[in-house]
Amino acid sequence: MGTPTTHILPCTAGIGLRAPHYREVLQGLPKLGWVEVHNENFFGGGAPLHTLLKVREHYPVSLHGVGMGLASTTPLANDHLIALHRLCDAVQPAAISEHLCWNAAARMVINDLLPFPYTAEALDHVARRVEQVQEKLGRQLLVENLSSYLTFAHSEMTEGEFLAELTRRTGCGILFDVENLYVNVRNLGVDADAFIKSIPAEAVKEYHLAGFDERDGCLVDTHSYPVSSEVWELFESVLRHIGPRPTLIEWDSDIPALPVLMAEAAKAKQRLEVCHACVE
Amino acid sequence: MLALSDDLTVFGSAIVRGEAVSPLVDTVYPHYSVATAIDIYRNNYCGNLHDALASAYPVIYQLVGDDFFRFLARQFIAQYPSCSANLHHFGAELADFLTTFEPAQKLVYLADVAALEWACHRAYFADDAVMLDINKLAQIPPEQYSDLIMRIHPASQVVRSRYPINAIWHAHQSGENGDFHIELDSGTNIVLVSRIADVVQVNELEEDCAAWLHEIQAGRAMGVATDLTLERFPDFDLHAALLNLVRQNILIDFNPGVIT
């Protein structure tokens, strides 16, 4: 079977593909622009990798990491890098991304996406690690802005400024999670327009959209609901400023039936098409 | 030494051990307190580990129920904190933990079921290997058999127990109606875990076959392994064992250097 041209993400909507939908997708081959999966679920090969390689025969695949810890202060885990390299070789993904966060320090590993102070020192540190990853993989890494529930008193720049400088230094791309920005706007009072203007549009290679939950007044980035009307509105504004890019619907807990995800993707696709029309 | 490292350690200790986070982080937020924020991170931390444990140990989860599993997971997380960024690595020590976990001592088989489930979890993520074509083995002249070094599928594992863990495991797979009767003192159970294509297999293994497989796993040539097994089990049937282990995708290849 010939592999379709799937080395770049098409500028349309895709979905985050999770275990409950593997079978349905492989049997029905629904019309999906592309899919994104979490790297760590396919490390070590075996049964999960089998499934992913079958998916890869039909769709462009983006590999999205949740465990690299680009800002962690323990050394980059070599086994993690090797496993990712191996996965890249097997899958030949259309994109590969990680989060601007940390998950390990001293002797602690915290399996989450944690914020850190945006200082010049942190920028040097993260830039070195992004370079290390890009060197190992031999390709560009996309780095995703984070949803955060607190800020550090001694941050020296905004997250947008940090990301902009990171792309300038390392040549990495930006995965712009619009829902993460919205969560930060509501929780932390981040200025959405300032964020959008602070990152270089040409470095943005992908968007993420998802739904959040709320707890005691704090929006929590749970990926457990449809995209809210406020996030759609912010997405439209982002499209006007930055332009259309491959856009992913993420849903990671209380995962709904596939048609629900596809309907969300259709909404994103429609907005991308309106935006395409404006650009042309 | 990075100042960042100190910052992350303070923040991390607040999440993991509930230590103070001020004056590191801003304390005023428009709609909630900093304690709420730390609480959310703490919940994420415990919740992610709990979910990873529950997904690696679905039978233990069913055996003890939601509430007790939550309690057990909390104690386990405190005793064996995560040490890998890959959540699929979390929970390897659950069987060890359960052997000394006082509140579960009445469920004498629990630790062994956990060992079996971890073997299944590892088998699921183990590397692929092509199934051995039994005809390829049949082409080897019998006089060369004893020199063959067999290769074992990376998913293969053997779990032993004084309890009928094979029956317990099978009774808790989806599709079973939960209506079962298990004799706890039915004798030693040897369980073979393997993977055929994408599906993890769990089957009981005869004592002699397990002994032979143990020698093969130790890298012994087939002749030596068979002689050692026959010393302990005079009725050992090599032909039957080979067929069984090839069918279960345990033996995947043999040393090609011997054939040429």
Image (cartoon, coloured by chain):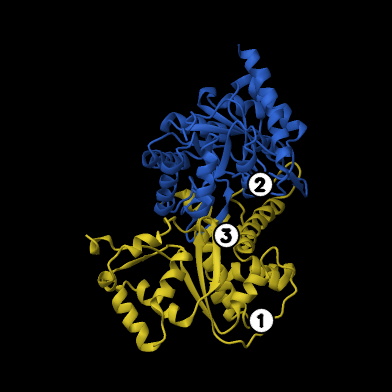
What is the CA distance from the residue labelled 3 to the residue labelled 2?
27 Å
Give the x, y percent position of residue B93. 53, 71
Amino acid type, callout 2? Asp
Is A26 located above or below residue B108 in the figure?
A: above
Mark 2, residue position: A252
Of pointers 1 and 3, the one earlier in the residue sequence: 3
Chain B on-screen colour: yellow
Between label 1 and label 3, give the one nearer the viewer: 1
From the image, tell me which residue sits under label 3: B13
**Disc 1 designates what residue?**
B107
Q: Residues within 10 Å of mark 3 (few under 14, many from 20)?
A: some
Question: From the viewer's perspective, is residue B54 above or below residue A268?
Answer: below
Question: Is residue A65 visible to us here?
Answer: no
Chain with colour blue in the figure: A
Residue B94 in percent (x, y) is at: 57, 71
The secondary structure type at the circle numbered 1 is loop
Where residue A152 sits: x, y (%)? 59, 45
Image vertical order of residue A177 relative to residue B64, above or below:
above
Split into 4 quadrants, where in the image is the C terminus of chain A?
A: top right
Q: Are marks 3 and 2 on the same chain?
A: no
